[in-house]
Amino acid sequence: MAYREKRYEENAIDESLAPLIKMPLPGPKARALVELDGRYMSPSYTRVYPLVAKRGRGAVIEDVDGNLFMDFNAGIACCSTGHCHPRVVEAICKQASTLIHYAGTDFYYEPQAHLAKKLSEIAPGEELMKVFFGNTGTEAIEGSLKLARYHTGRKKFIAFHRAFHGRTMGSLALTCSKTTQRKHFFPMMPGVIHVPYGYCYRCAYKLTYPECNLYCVSYIEEIIFQGITDPEEVAAIVIEPIQGEGGYVVPPDDYHRALKSMAEKYGILFIADEVQSGMGRTGKMFAMEHYGVVADIITLAKGIGSGMVIGPILARESIMTWKPGSHGNTFGGNPVACMAVLETIALLEEGLIEQAAVEGAYFLSQLKRLQERHELIGEVRGKGLMIGIELVRDRETREMAKKEANEVVQICFEKGLLTLPCGPNVIRFSPPLVISRKQIDRGLAILDEALAQVEGKRGK
Ligand code: PMP
């Protein structure tokens, strides 16, 4: 006990000092680690800048050279309760000294069943939801595809342009946010039909909302179900409530309702991939709640465990009827991860969802003010603390400012702000939900400078 507390103290960071960059980046220790990594790690990883994280507290990351960064990434929307929240650390340590693993597919233990009950209680909808535990986002998606096939007896799926659902052969068949993710891996799971997402800023049909009458939804009935597949062959529509990797794309308010009622008409299941948008990030527990839609199946991961590895599938009781042996794994529902999730949910319910809604609205309004001064910002969009800015070279033509988006991200890093691009020309902000207004302001001041620097170079 004393040892644990001492370690926690030793690793404390004074968040009020951040950002604090003491040297040109990467510093000497970071450079050495990047070299080591390059020698032994798979070259498939996609590092955007040489951050070598050493420790984290709240919304601050310290690197191996002692530089402090304001974190607008949260380890890609995972560390929702902030880095090393004391209650999450306590829950993890307590469970780790009690029982670390016992294979939840084959045996029983308390944390798994208790967490399933809690997830079922917080899930939207009238019908009881049952839970299957995978370990990652992609594993949750794989399971949801199998469940949809098992339950409906149908084989095909509808997915969306720019979607990201993971990188294993089933989820990769749905993923289409970047061709590099798919190139060399054909054939993936067959039977996936891709259609345009409700992305009004770049409407595939060059229509304008709301006069378009959501043609992107009726297109599925008019074209896909007339000429490409009979709807009776479609097991499920798989969709992100707000697209993540594809560019933090927020569809119009009535979009998901229209899709869901079309799905119901044909007995097609509606799978909401809440891996990135779920667990309070958008200012509601599940992002689909903004749209008033109750999904048949929900996939989760990322922010649910404050950084611990877990990927649950929630499905209506009448759907999750597969027989023993039809799906399982070794590590899913790991007791330590389950306890981290239970503590995370408690913290979300005690105020972090509300904080994400309030601070997210402030964050968004400040970005809109930046947009008035920076021509590069074509669109500001988001819900809660899931926010993106789409950069364009020209606001009329909306030519994508891909190089500029990367330059802004690099400069932010050099000045002590961690952000990440998504889609070809979008910068995303997914900070820990504990982030304070002061910290948001500090980060935005850096973003302001970085945008000005890139625009200055272009003579704007
Ligand atoms: N679905 C969505 C919406 C995601 O954003 C991601 C990861 N970016 C995944 C699935 C895959 O998750 P994982 O990387 O844990 O496999």
Image (cartoon, rainbow, N blue to C red):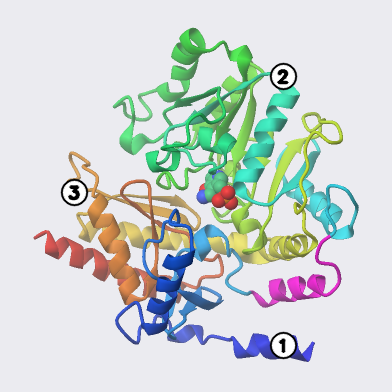
Specify the farthest residue to the top.
226
Is residue 36 shown above or below 260?
A: below
Query: Label 2 amino acid?
Result: Gly
Of labels 2 and 3, earlier in sequence is: 2
Is residue 99 on the magenta stretch? yes
> Circle 3 sits in a helix, a strand or a loop, which is it?
loop
Return the mark for residue 5.
1
Which residue position holds label 2?
A: 153
Quote the CA–CA distance across marks 1 and 2.
53 Å
Is residue 453 shown above or below 278?
A: below
Magenta range is 85-101
Quote the CA–CA distance across marks 1 and 3.
51 Å
Of labels 1 and 3, earlier in sequence is: 1
Of labels 1 and 2, earlier in sequence is: 1
Is ligand 1 within 8 Å of the beta carbon of the residue shown at mark 2?
A: no
Return the mark for residue 393.
3
**Where's residue 70, x and y in %?**
43, 74
Q: Which residue shows up at 43% across the image and 62% down it?
A: 362
Q: Which residue shows up at 82% across the image and 75% down it?
A: 97
Q: Which mark's residue is nearer the viewer, 2 or 3? A: 2
Query: Label 1 amino acid?
Result: Glu
The secondary structure making up most of the magenta span is helix
